[in-house]
Image (cartoon, rainbow, N blue to C red):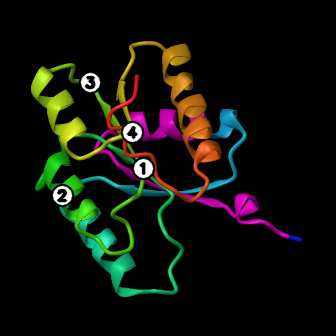
Amino acid sequence: MMTTRSRVKQIMVAEDSPADVILVRMALQRSGLDFELHVLDDGEKAITFLEKLDASPAADPIDLLLLDMHLPKYDGEEILMRLRSSENHAQTPVVIMTASDAPQDHARAQKHAAMHYFRKPSDLAGYMQLGIIIRDLLSSDTGSRDERGVGK
């Protein structure tokens, strides 16, 4: 019997740095997750992607959004507001992935119930921790979304 846990995880990455996308992909591969990565390099593309998913009930839902708060065209908070207003994706877990440690960015992430605030590290080993964080978030997701706000 096939369970939903064996389904390929659909992970949306809203990130404008190609180098960071490479590191995200590497971290996810090392974590052992079976995933499909949807990379959107600006806020407008991210919002359009979410709208297309909402318009297509047959589309696989997004299991996780990795979000850079500082994107061209629309920023991370605008993407979070669109995601949280979505009928199909309002409960999607979000990991904020940013170089900023500004208090206002932490507050915006918490306001929109991000599950984790991941400050981009300066070394490869630090970045590989992202894969572990994501694997743990997705493996603990049993269908009911955790609304405790920003994690560690």
Q: If the image is split into quadrants, where does the C terminus sit?
A: top left
Q: Mark 2 points at which residue?
A: 81
Tag 4 or tag 1, which sits nearer the N-term? Answer: 1
Q: Name the residue under label 4.
A: 115
Q: Residue at x 61, y 39 (%)?
A: 135
Q: Where is residue 37 in the image (x, y as percent from the top left)?
A: 52, 55
**Of the numbered discs in the image, which one, if any, rests on residue 39?**
none
Q: If the image is split into quadrants, where does the N terminus sit?
A: bottom right
Mark 4, secondary structure of its residue? loop
Amino acid type shown at disc 1? Pro
Q: Residue at x 56, y 24 (%)?
A: 128
- At label 4, counting other C-alpha atoms closer than 10 Å, the crowd grade (few under 14, some 14-19, many 20 or more) is many
Quarter of the figure with residue 122 = top left
Q: Name the residue under label 1.
A: 93
Tag 1 or tag 3, which sits nearer the N-term? Answer: 1
Which residues are the magenta region?
2-27
Contact, mark 2 vs mark 4 (Cβ under 8 Å):
no
Amino acid type shown at disc 2? Met
